[in-house]
Amino acid sequence: MIRPRHSAVAFAMVALAGCAAAPPAPMPVATAPAPAAAAKPEPLPVTPVPVPAVVIVQSPPQSPAQPPAAPPPVNEEEQQALALLADLQRYAVDSGEDLKRELVAANAALARTRSDANRIRVAMLLTLAAAGPPDDARAQSLLEPVVGRSGNSSPLKQIAVLLYAQIVERARSVREEQKRTLAAQEKLDALRAVERSLLLERSRNAGGGSAGGGGGTGR
């Protein structure tokens, strides 16, 4: 009889141990209702935009740096021509004494070196009345070798041609003025000759009349 009681006690203890070891059932969690899906808007019509053509400009290849060009050689004749033009402008405002000294110095330079520039400078001064009595004949003779030289028209030759033409034109004007003066003088001399002839004729007539009158009175 004792065994059945021990069996019931053991069964009860096992049952209590199982109840103590089993965890409590979890509480159900309330879930929020899912939001309703939003209605999608209809897409707007899209007009395609033309894309401009892309032009790629490439810079030209750079040439290697070159050394600076050498200055052009100095043209001595052009320098002399510029000096002559500057002298001509200065002569236009110089006094008579200065021009006379310039003429003496120019003649001395021409005696040393008979260059075209020295010829033209002396010829310039010979045409200026303030430097002394103009000597167009000598000025022309100095310019003729430069003017008559063949070849390209150099700056010095251009100045010589211009000066020579002015001298020739002035000489022509002087000759024409001399001709007019001579013609007027000849006319004046002719009128004076006529006047003297009339006076002489009148004197003769007056003398003859007086002699005739005196003879009649004597008879």
Image (cartoon, grey):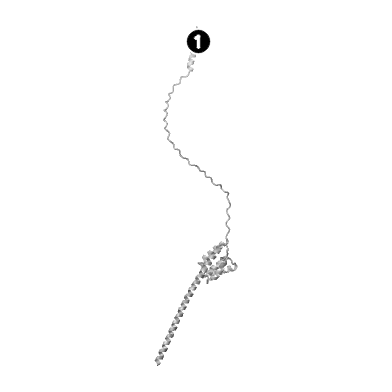
Q: Position of residue 171 (x, y in %)?
A: 51, 70
Q: Is 105 in front, or is 16?
A: 105
Q: Position of residue 33 (x, y in %)?
A: 42, 25
- The answer to whether residue 96 is seen in the rendering is no
Residue furthest top in the image: 1
Viewport quadrant of the C terminus: bottom left
Q: Is 199 in front, or is 110?
A: 199
Q: Which residue is mark 1?
A: 7
Residue furthest right in the image: 112
Q: Residue at x 43, y 87 (%)?
A: 208
Left or right placement of residue 49 versus residue 108 in this view: left
Q: Is 179 in front, or is 131?
A: 179
Q: Position of residue 216 (x, y in %)?
A: 40, 91
Left or right placement of residue 77 versus residue 195 in this view: right
Q: Position of residue 128 (x, y in %)?
A: 52, 69
Q: Amino acid at mark 1?
A: Ser
Check disc 1: other Cα within 10 Å, few if <14, some if 14-19, many if 20+.
few
Q: Residue at x 54, y 65 (%)?
A: 161
- The answer to whether residue 161 is seen in the rendering is yes
Residue furthest bottom in the image: 219
Left or right placement of residue 216 versus residue 107 in this view: left
Q: Is 97 in front, or is 155?
A: 155
Total marks placed: 1
